[in-house]
Image: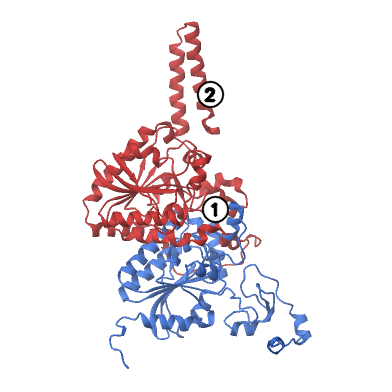
Amino acid sequence: MFKDIFRKPKYVTLPSTGSVQQQNPPAAPSNRKELPDGLWVKCSNCGEALYKKDLVENDQVCTSCNYHFRITAHERLELITDPGSFEEWDVELHSNDPLEFPGYGTKLKQAEEKSKQTESVLTGKATIEDSPVVLAINEGNFMMGSMGSVTGEKITRAIERAIELRLPVIIFSTSGGARMQEGILSLYQMAKTSAALARLSENHLLYISVLTDPTFGGVTASYASLGDIQIAEPGALIGFTGPRVIKQTMRQELPPGAQTAEFNQDHGLIDLVVERSQIRSVLGRLLRYHQEGADYGTTLRI
Amino acid sequence: MAQHFEFEKPILELEQKIAELQAFSRDKELDLTQEISKLQHKLVRQKKEIYGHLEPWQKVQIARHSERPNFYDYAPLLFEDFIELKGDRLFADDRAIVGGIASFRGIPVTVVAHVKGKDTKENIQRNFGMPHPEGYRKALRLMDQADKFNRPILTFIDTPGAACDLEAEERGQGEAIARCLQAMAGYQVPIISMVIGEGGSGGALALGVGNVVLMLENSFYSVIAPESCASILWKDPGKAKEAASSLKFTAQDLLALGVADEILREPLGGAHKNLTKTAEEIANGIAKYLEKLREQTPETLKQQRYEKLRAIGQFEERASQEATGPSEIDESFEITDSADTTGL
């Protein structure tokens, strides 16, 4: 009976300024899932053609299906920190290709050019809604955010400085895992960062881990899983083994939605799935709860 | 039938020839002692030549040898007593990781070890030595107890890697491993980690945060299996041999990189050629370091372990380079795509 009342009206879709559209056809689907150049962007999830300006204004979240596009470390920094509050640390650290791994030197150069970053993580100090915090943000465009010696060192130094400064730590992860071109040295960065987080924890300082698309392998198996509070972006793929490897090696089909943030939450591995538009305010609130000398309700005012 | 490798052929041929000559001399009652002893000398030289100069890929083959001793083979030779303790108290008992309390030369210790099966049936039970999250959570439970009761921890690493199926994902494989890493960093008891076979990536590292890391001569310890590395980088699993050399994962490499502290010698040809001798070597390695570590205060042990981890990794400090000219690298190659889903 009420069905008709609540049903969404169907509108006729008109091509908006057809000439513009013709000159700028929707960008070809990019498997890198970053924002391509051009006025229009095709959502890699629902296929909807989105006006780029709208998409940027919407924090690069699809206005049609809520798909969260992958964003750079700097874009994320802008999204969450108070303007002008960020102080970057340890930019001078560079990988020196310790194993002389074939092709690694060239790949590092390419990654620097592509990402305009010196490594796969950005670290430093900032404020979020006026609360001071130590931040580490993975840069997905730098060799898929993979963790090498420098990544591990930067994160470890950041955590150690947080202990000195008695500040909480937030790490945004997006990573394919440990970087194979640095072999065992990459693997032990997992242990190194986890050890630093153990110290942070012993010092009763807060660590919030925010997992974004994609977070896998050695990063999931180290710092990204050790948050006092675990947050993920909607739809982000999070896991230990990548879906393709599971399919290949186990000859196992994954059910729809496997390894998404929501799947991980359903399995008890994530506290909160937070929309990009809300992340700043959620982090701000959580930081205020954990501020040094915070009032834990001992002076209840009625 | 015993498993042999291509590179061992000259040795096997020589051994066969000696056996034939011996049989011949017995049958015909001929004195061939001189010829035989000549060949035996040649055999010794040959073995030293071949086994003494193994390529990384050949070491991988030995480390994965179907007869390579596992923890259960060593346990009765290392400990006067071993009581296996099971289960993670949360979900199940994982048989790819075993653990318990044991007595090492009179010292109570907690032991945690990966175990691969000896045959197909046992390998299915033990998931080929690839633990699920409940395995790591069992390890964590037992190690927590070691810390509580002030017992040194001995870990034996031998796994192709952590289980990589949907069930492992559902139960939080990444979290289970990460907790082990974090907890081991905080323990105030001596931890000795030994790689006795395959050290496969994060699944191995979860037991690898020792004050001391010892490696058997023919073991390897890597961020990724050489086959997977080859298929990601060169789209060709057949190039595993090259990957094995590039990854620098042998015991000798790890000693040079500051990850391993000492190499434990194996008999020529590998641990499976002489179990007792290998066990002796392991026992001596444990004894040497356990004695030193037990003299340390709890706080020093923890600090020393942190400093060991802190020193792993190589980098340089320099100002950022200006963007260089256009790259000539084939753009069709996408590391991002593969790394994306590999999950190292």
Badge 2, how many Cα within 10 Å: few under 14, some, many 20+?
few
- Left or right? Give the position of B44 relative to A17: left
Considering every residue shown, the one lying at the far bottom of the view is A302
Given residues B114 and B326, the one toward you in this image is B114
Q: Position of residue B220 (x, y in %)?
A: 45, 45
Q: Which mark identifies residue B13?
A: 2
> In the image, what residue occupies the spot 28% across and 59% down?
B302
Chain letter for the part of the structure drawn in red: B
Q: Indicate the amino acid at tag 2.
A: Glu
Colour of the chain lettered A: blue
Q: State the residue position of label 1.
A: A102
B248 up-or-down from A74: above or below: above
* Residue A3 in sight in this render: yes
B210 up-or-down from B2: above or below: below
In 3D space, how far apart are the residues under numbered discs 1 and 2 (Cα atoms)?
Answer: 37 Å
Q: Where is residue A230 in the image (x, y as percent from the top left)?
A: 45, 71
Given residues B38 and A265, the one toward you in this image is A265
> In the image, what residue occupies the spot 62% across and 68% down?
A32
A153 up-or-down from A24: above or below: above
Tag in front: 1 or 2? 2
